[in-house]
Image (cartoon, rainbow, N blue to C red):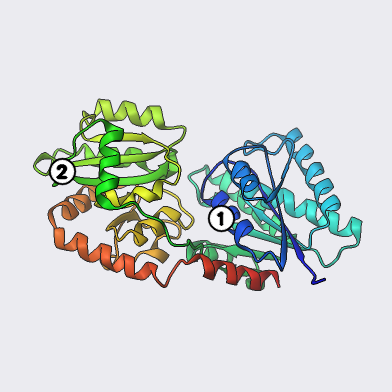
Amino acid sequence: MAYHQKVLYVITKSVWGGAQRYIFDLATNLPGGQFEVVVATGGSGPLFDKLQKAGVRTITIPGLQRDINLWKELVSLWYLFKIFVREKPDIIHLNSSKVGGLGAIAAFAAKLTTYNLQLTTIFTVHGWPFNEKRPWWQKKFIRFLSWLGALFQDKIILINTADLNAAKQFIPSRKLALIYNGIGPVNFMERAAARNFFAEKLSKKLETDTIIIGTIAEFTPNKGLTGLLQALHNPNYAMSNIRCLTLLIGWGEERSKLQNLIQEFGLHGSVFLVDFLPEAAHYLKGFDIFILPSLKEGLPYTIMEAMQAGLPIVATSVGGIPDMITHQHDGLLIPPQDPLRLTQTLDLLLRDVRLRKTLGENARKKSETRFRLRDMIENMIKIYA
């Protein structure tokens, strides 16, 4: 019988975001003849459900959560150690900052306890937390913890060039690898059908010349959606004389805040929040412009999907987005937290049909050779070898 490598993926939360999709794609696409896959996560949720439906074995880690709680961290550390000893994996692949630290320490302890010196610990960085908006002392402390965790990690995978460059400042280059995320072909709904779906969802008639600006995002501060509303509120914005509406498809803690701002800014007739749609990417061809005004990103799947859909893209130059979009060739890049620049950029695209078409077509062509799921899987197998 051929030898199977056992890969144990670990992540803090079982919600459905970029890091969770990353694990799902790896867990369900590694060759079954070469790998046995198990996923451990802190509690149930969409990721848990999707994995179980796909036939992937899952494990719950008691006490593991995103918020800091010393007692629960110690409980989680103990359970991680017990899981690693019991499961006897060949590879432990950690995801999320907290698990990257706790999991690496637990894996090192399990390696010594079981004398399994061949156990390999891998950590994928989905964005360094010390690059987030925090007090300086917190950034310094988190950077120290990241360095400490790296001592126990055999390989660290970065998903964009910015995070790779940051890692090189405190981690030996031999431990680092750049592997872009990727997606498979998206089964898009035809444009007319997608627009009809939106019309029904909004209980609103959409004229054929209505331009739809849209995004798919978690409603959290990092996505910069309040800045988008400020940009749309600009009195010089072209919405005043072009038939246009904006759809924000998603979920999250800022939903009420965004709804209140829409009312406060008088945008309730042109900006709409659409609750999270399963497989929301299916409807992308109903958009005319895709926008992602994030303050922080890793390598967003939504931009990959928008590229496949052939949409002109407006996005902020943060995280891995500049790795994906070449400014003025297959999208338009703007600084984060700059509502005026965002207003001007949207105004340009609304008025220039030819530019929208050129950017969208170039983005679609790029998606044919870049950010492909099969490339991500092949590169990961090389890391596991």
Alpha carbon distance from label 2 to label 1: 37 Å
User: x and y percent of residue 222 in the render?
Assistant: 44, 44
Q: Position of 89 compared to 95: left or right?
A: right
- Kindly identify which residue carries mark 1: 22
User: x and y percent of residue 151 in the render?
Assistant: 73, 61
| Residue 21 or residue 335, whichever sits in front | 21
Quadrant where the N terminus is found in the figure: bottom right
Q: Are marks 2 and 1 in contact (CB under 8 Å)?
A: no
In the figure, 230 relative to 36: above or below? above
Quadrant where the C terminus is found in the figure: bottom right
| Residue 191 or residue 380, whichever sits in front | 191
Q: Position of 88 compared to 19: left or right?
A: right
- Kindly identify which residue carries mark 2: 237
Mark 2 closeness class: few <14, some 14–19, many ≥20 residues within 10 Å: many
Residue at 28 percent of width and 32 percent of height? 202
Amino acid type, callout 1: Tyr
Can see residue 301?
A: yes
- Secondary element under disc 1, as helix, strand or loop, is helix
| Residue 307 or residue 346, whichever sits in front | 307
- Camera-near label (2 vs 1) is 1
In the figure, 199 relative to 300: above or below? above
In the figure, 194 relative to 219: above or below? below
Amino acid type, callout 2: Tyr
- Secondary element under disc 2, as helix, strand or loop, is loop
Mark 1 closeness class: few <14, some 14–19, many ≥20 residues within 10 Å: many
Residue at 68 percent of width and 66 percent of height? 155
Give the mark nearer the N terminus: 2 vs 1.
Answer: 1
User: x and y percent of residue 208 in the render?
Assistant: 15, 46
User: x and y percent of residue 33 in the render?
Assistant: 71, 67
